[in-house]
Image: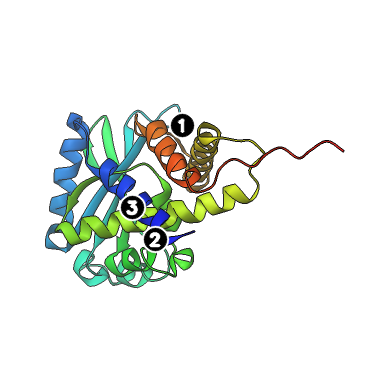
Amino acid sequence: MRDDVEERLAAVAQSYLAPGELTAPVSLLTERIGRRFGPSLEALLHYGSGRPLDPGGKAVVYAFIAVVTSSADAFPRSWLLRLASHVWTPELFVRGTEDACAKVVVILAADLKRGAGPRAAASRHVGRFRNRMWLLRARDEAVARLVARCQARALALQVHEVLATRPAGEGADALARRLIELADEGHRLEDRHVEFEKLADAPAFYREVARVVLAERPPRAPAAAR
């Protein structure tokens, strides 16, 4: 995908990363996650919520991504988590209230940079950044831009896959629906115990992504009858 298209995707991502009005549970969990990681927290993202499929589970699970400076800073008391963070992605649960808790996926700042670079496809976390997300905290503007760039790369990779099998004549709305379906499939694979709900404006976000891409690639004409 051309660099100028990725630049426009990054601009779309950055314009949507600003959070809307936070609900009380998300605001509380944001504060508690911030205290949990302290100065090691580079960025904190929120990308939806869900209810446990277990009938006995009552608490709403809110999904977050915490980007941390290093595993040593994030897990100073656990050598096992420090080691594991270089092999698989740690997930922590942070309690908010009896009715709300946070599932926090922890990734390293080095992995965020990798996801924003030319080798994004090799990143373990590229799939997570295809989601519609809110950037709740960022250390500085440079980190905020890096998050947007990482999301742009992740979306570009997914769009490239979808366009390769796109039916003739399909427009932006159909492409947006397919991107939403793939995001839903990713959530079901990631967590089979929670019925996940995206942020409310996710459809508008994916339509904007589709329009940016298709502005450079008009719909294919149906094959002529023989």
Q: Which amino acid, by three-letter code, is at mark 3?
A: Ala
Mark 1: give few (<14), some (14-19) or many (20+) Cα within 10 Å. Answer: few
131 lies left or right of 41: right
Classify 199 as above or below 119: above
Residue type of the residue flagged with mark 2: Thr
- What mark, if any, has residue 89 been given in the picture? 2
Mark 3 Cα-neighbour bin, 10 Å: few <14, some 14–19, many ≥20: many
Mark 2 closeness class: few <14, some 14–19, many ≥20 residues within 10 Å: some
The picture places residue 125, in percent across and down from the top left corner, at 41, 59
Depicted 177 relative to depicted 94: above or below: above
How far from the left and from the top, in percent, is residue 77?
A: 21, 67
Residue 154 on image: x %, y % = 43, 55
What residue would you read off at disc 1? Answer: 54
| Mark 3 and mark 2 residues within 8 Å of each other at the beta carbon | no
**Quick check: can you spot residue 155?**
yes
Of 154 and 221, nearer the camera is: 221
The residue beneath circle 3 is 10
